[in-house]
Amino acid sequence: MAALCSAVGVSLGAVVRFLVPSVFYGPPQSFKIGNPGDFPYGPPTFLADEKIFVFRDRERGFAVASAVCTHLGCTVAYFQNDRDFHCPCHGSVFSPTGAVLHGPAPRPLNWFEITLTRDGQLRVDKDKTVPPTYRLMV
């Protein structure tokens, strides 16, 4: 009887292991976004595929903010007239630093590390969050 239970247990374990994928494919969290000259000064550039805003300021340099609302993951929009981020789904509003001005968002927008690669391109790393004051001077 013990041998039968053991065989059934091993078989079930093998079936479960077969059904669960070994590798989960997801988009890379570190990626190049182009050369510094590709980004104008002034309002941020929205990169829809990456769901980020790239800011470029003459005095403060480059910064990257997430375009994903911290409430339910909708894509926020940036409004130049008030310099705030607005979520179209449930009305959350974020300040220019990403702080929550009006809920239901539970926390601020994320800001990501931006660096310059050896080949002169800008690289964003979504695995490395930084404070809203973080800037890359180029």
Image (cartoon, rainbow, N blue to C red):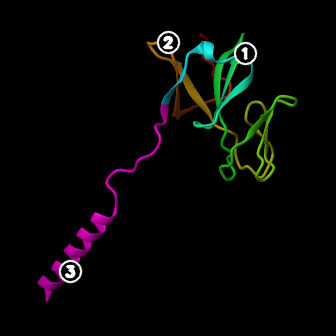
Q: Residue at x 25, y 75 (%)?
A: 12
Dot 2, how many residues are within 10 Å of its Cα: few (below 14), some (14-19), or many (20+)? few
In this orientation, which residue lies closer to the viewer: 124 or 101?
124
The answer to the question of whether label 1 and label 3 lie on touching residues, with beta carbons closer than 8 A, is no
Q: Residue at x 63, y 23 (%)?
A: 134
Q: In the rendered image of this protein, does residue 10 appear above or below residue 115?
A: below
Disc 2 target residue:
120
Q: Residue at x 58, y 31 (%)?
A: 112
Disc 1 target residue:
41
The magenta-colored residue range is 1-30
The secondary structure type at the circle numbered 3 is: helix
Q: Confirm whether the magenta stretch covers residue 28.
A: yes
Q: Amino acid at mark 1?
A: Tyr
In this orientation, which residue lies closer to the viewer: 93 or 42?
42
Q: Quadrant of the C terminus?
A: top right
The secondary structure type at the circle numbered 2 is: loop
Residue 71, image x, y percentages: 69, 51
Identify the disc placed on residue 8.
Answer: 3
Dot 3, how many residues are within 10 Å of its Cα: few (below 14), some (14-19), or many (20+)? few
The answer to the question of whether label 1 and label 2 lie on touching residues, with beta carbons closer than 8 A, is no
Q: Residue furthest bottom?
A: 1
Q: Is residue 131 left or right of residue 123?
A: right
Q: Amino acid at mark 3?
A: Val
Q: What secondary structure do most residues of the magenta stretch adopt?
A: helix
